[in-house]
Amino acid sequence: MKQEVIMIKLGEIALKGLNRKTFEDTLVKNIKWRLRGVGKFAVTRAQSTMYIEPKEDDIDFDEAADHLSNVFGIAAFTRALVTEKKLEAIKADAVEYMRDVLPYAKTFKVTAKRADKSFPLTSPQIQQELGGTLLDAYPHLKVDVHNPEVTVTIEIRDFGAYIHGKQIPGAGGMPVGSSGKAMVLISGGIDSPVAAYMMAKRGLILHAVHFVSPPYTSDRARQKVEDLCEIVSRYAGRIYFHCVPFTKIQEAIKTHCPEEFFTIIMRRLMMEIAIRISEENDLKALITGESLAQVASQTIGAIAATDDVCTMPVFRPLIGMDKNEIIEIARKIGTFETSILPFEDCCTVFTPKHPKTRPAVEQVRAAQAAFDFAPLVEEAVRETEVKTIAAL
């Protein structure tokens, strides 16, 4: 019966009601997809726990754990040895299974969880018996129930006894795909990849729209954004990348609109295009990396003028965060170093010297109405390139 498995503890999913199975099914699918390059696994579930059982020899458990650490919906996970629900088997296997850890520790404790109440010993009795056995096997150890270097856990469950050490924190959140689909407006900056990550953590499948303005922006700038999407896809799974040609629109803004409104009108047209593409792909919301008052286009007035053209919800997960908080998350998820590469995107093209920070919506509408952008918007949507980006 002895076999090593990975035990997964569920987070918010465990609090769901009658539709909990739907969330669990989504998580199982995501786990299998994320482990596709590691090997074949069976995933079973019972008592708010999932069990990942390898179906091939020589599975690299460290690689599997690395992949699982990025899967949203997992609260914690650990490698565990499955053994018989017999005290002597548990003792012998715990001594052997913890041989890579306990010889190098000074203190330890044993915790027991008896989900199968038919097991003849109570949890405190299991802890006492197994603790004594481990002290005999590793006499240099001391028991510390408050702050041990190593915690040995034994779980008595329906299908067997599970022996494991420290649990590894998971990515948390909700399984990607459990909350629908949305479009993130992504640039080459620090903020929008973080916003994408945060909304994927709430269960959204991501599409990403990026605007390019050659010759004002370079191929390297576009590649930078695709690289950022690839990094985010380590957490979010597949990202459907829409690249929109935006040069003609920006040149028309520069020619026909007041300079102080350049950025706001640009963002309004970006929103209109993003909505058009979203509707074609059955997406239900937009996501931006805006943080209130960070730049002139992110004041209350500017955001109101931008939202004036929106016909679907706009999620702004960074709206109340300061830059240092955003950078901290960017470093954590691995996007920061790519985001600061010096390749400018279209948001820096034709930047006004004195942008309007408190625009009235009526003023912006009038400024935009000075030119008929509809044909250019149609052309941009029609000529948008689409590709799928997914981390290995």
Image (cartoon, helix red, strand yellow):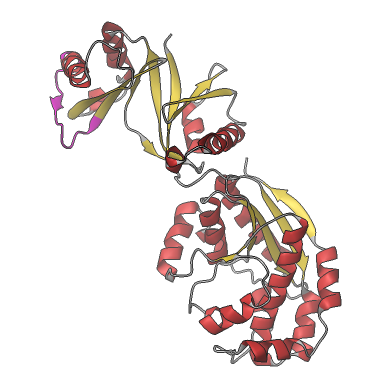
Q: Position of residue 51 (x, y in %)?
A: 47, 25
User: Relative to the observer, which residue lies in front, 17 or 359?
Assistant: 17
Q: Is residue 259 left or right of residue 337?
A: right
Q: How many marks on residues?
A: 0
Query: What residue do we see at 60% from left, 34% from top?
Result: 29
**Is 335 part of what is drawn in magenta?**
no
Q: Is residue 172 left or right of residue 27?
A: left
Q: Quadrant of residue 164?
A: top left
The overriding secondary structure of the stretch rendered in magenta is loop
Q: Quadrant of the C terminus?
A: top right
**Is 149 part of what is drawn in magenta?**
yes
The answer to whether residue 155 is seen in the rendering is yes
Q: Position of residue 8 (x, y in %)?
A: 44, 31
Q: Position of residue 59 (x, y in %)?
A: 53, 22
Give the magenta range.
136-150
Considering only vertical position in the picture, is 250 above or below 358?
above
Q: Quadrant of the N terminus?
A: top left
Q: Is residue 324 left or right of residue 137?
A: right
The answer to whether residue 190 is seen in the rendering is no
Q: Quadrant of residue 242?
A: bottom right
Query: What residue do we see at 57% from left, 37% from top?
Result: 22
Considering only vertical position in the picture, is 220 above or below 236?
below
User: Relative to the observer, which residue lies in front, 137 or 323?
Assistant: 323
Considering only vertical position in the picture, is 95 above or below 47?
above
